[in-house]
Structures are given as C-alpha cells and as structure tokens.
Image (tube, helix red, strand yellow):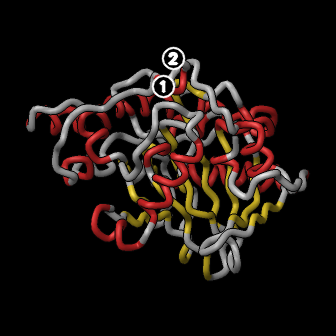
Amino acid sequence: MNNLQRRPSFHGDFSVWVLTSAGGGGKLRASTTTRHSVLELVADLDDAMSLYLLENRMYGMTSGAAFGSTGYHVRDEFLSAEGCEALLAQIASYREKNVLPRIHRPMKGRSLRYSVIDGERIQRDLENIWTLYQGKMNEFVNKLTGISMEPLANSRAGVNVNIMPPGRSEYRWHYDRTTITAILYLNRVEGGETVLYPNYRILLEDPRRVRLQSLLDRALQLRVIRGAFGKKVVVEPRPGRLVVMRANRCWHSVRGVRGSSERINVILSYDVPGAEYPMERGLDTYLYTQEKTASSDPNYAR
C-alpha cells in the first residue's frame, strides 16, 4: 500500500450548522511595529478553538468529526484587517520588483485565468506568509481536523498567492491533490466567490485507476446529479476570512471577478506525512508556468 492510500479518515454524521456557529471568535492582538508582527494579528488559536470544541462536545462530537461531516469550515476574522493590509503591502512590494506569470488554460465552462506567486518565491521573498504557512495555519488545521497534517514537501505547491484581476479572470472547476486546502482572503471584491461542493467525490484508494476516477468525477459533475446529491456552498471574499476544505473531496472553483479591484488570496495546502502525488510534475507545470502541457487536465494524467 502506498502513501496515497493512507489518507486520514474523519468520523461522524452531524448537522452542518454546528460548524458555522463558532463565528469569528477569538482575540486579536494588533501590532504592526516590526516586519514579523503581522503574525500577531492572527486570531488566538486557543481561544478560537476552545469555543468550537465546547460547542461540539455539547452534541457529543469531536472537532475532527464535525469537520469531517461537513467537509469545510468558514471562519471570519482569522486575520485582522491590519494583518491583511500588511500582507497586501508586502505582496505589492514584491510585484514591483518581479514579473508574475499569467496563466491561461482554456477549459469548457470555466477556464483557468490568474497570476500566481508560487511557494518557492514565497519562501525566498515573503517571509510572513511562509511563517504563517509553517506555523499558525498548520496548527489551526490540525486542531480543526483532529489529525496531524504537515506542510507539503513540494514547497512550490504548498503555499501560493493567487491574484485575479477584474475582467476575464476565473479559476476552473477541480479537486485538489491534497487532503486539506485553506484559502485566506486578503481583500473584498465584487464577484470572485469560491463555489464549493464539499464532501462530493467518490475517491478511489488506488491512484493508478486514473480513468475510472475521471469517469466517477464526471458523473458526479452532471447537473442532474449535482442537483440531487450535491450541496452548493458559495463563499464571498472578505478580508481575513478563512475557508478550510477537504480539498481532494471538494469540487470547487472561483467565479469571475467584476468591478475594478483585484482578488488576492493566499492558498495553503497540507497533507499527511509522506503523501505522494503521481500527477505532481505535470500539474505544477500547468499551474505555475505558461508552458504547454501534455494533458488538458493533469489531475487525470497517467
């Protein structure tokens, strides 16, 4: 059995509303006096999670069981407005000195159109985001899921800054390679909503069965099937809002951005120790470069 088969399992079958009741609780410590102080603006995890766990215990469930039953979690004010502004300023400074790749991968329905700062560049030049990925966010994800997750060995894919200008930008429908993805929004825009179908996949244990996995995924994506069995969740971008999802089981995309402002968010991915991804090389080329790829969808490449 290879590492991909040893995925974490979540237990429980509980009501969806329990996850949302914790809101954005937790203390915020505001300080912007040093270049590292943006991390102090992250909500206090002990306070934030204590309310969440208390509410879950009232209904006889653990944190991991509650998250597993819904497949996603939304928390407002995970990062304060000041923290978002600090990260946006650092990203803007980086962009003044560096040219970002503009990715366009045409797809039927909704294409992939965006610019990206990949994890290798973040590790080198955006220290606050890298430290958040390695520390506070990882801690939060582990408490939320009840499972020991870790940052990806592939730093390029582990944490990204996605930038979607208004107009024709959008992000295609897909499942992620990883067990957990967290989306941290840094600004408010018109449009640009993340659309989720959480816990909506029959995920095969054997990653070599690519053709069968593709057929199963396409069947579930049919409108009549989605309408009968899927639960559609729409999340609007708001500064400091965090979405955590079971990403390899959550079909999701981003609607086009309207208005005059760019949509800027941080994508942070986690998985169990030793996780491997057969499609990794082709998928990285597809997501982070303008090079041609052998497959129109590397998620299903052999």
- Contact between marks 2 and 1 (CB within 8 A): the answer is yes
Q: Which residue does the image show at 56% across and 56% down from the upper left?
A: 174
- Determine whether 145 is above or below 215 in the image: above
Residues 162 and 91: in front is 162
Name the spot of residue 152 as percent of width and height, x first.
Answer: 62, 28
Compared across the picture, whether 7 is left or right of 280 comes to left
Compared across the picture, whether 177 is left or right of 45 comes to right
Crowd rating for badge 1 (residues with CA inside 10 Å; few <14, some 14–19, many 20+):
few
Residues 222 and 150: in front is 222
Disc 1: which residue: 5
Residues 263 and 197: in front is 197
Q: Give how far apart the Cα atoms at labels 2 and 1 are.
A: 6 Å
In the rendered structure, which amino acid carries the disc numbered 2?
Met
Name the spot of residue 285 as percent of width and height, x first.
Answer: 80, 46
In the rendered structure, which amino acid carries the disc numbered 1?
Gln
Q: Which residue does the image show at 49% across and 43% down from the upper left?
A: 248
Q: Secondary structure at mark 1?
A: helix
Quadrant for residue 111, please give it.
Answer: bottom right
Disc 2: which residue: 1
Q: Quadrant of the C terminus?
A: top right
Q: Secondary structure at mark 2?
A: loop
Compared across the picture, whether 75 is left or right of 79 comes to left
Residue 58 visible (yes or no): yes
Q: Which residue does the image show at 37% across and 63% down from the upper left?
A: 233
Q: Which residue does the image show at 73% across and 58% down from the upper left?
A: 296
Name the spot of residue 72 as percent of width and height, x first.
Answer: 37, 48
Quadrant for residue 134, please give it.
Answer: top right
Q: How many marks?
A: 2
- Determine whether 151 is above or below 193 in the image: above
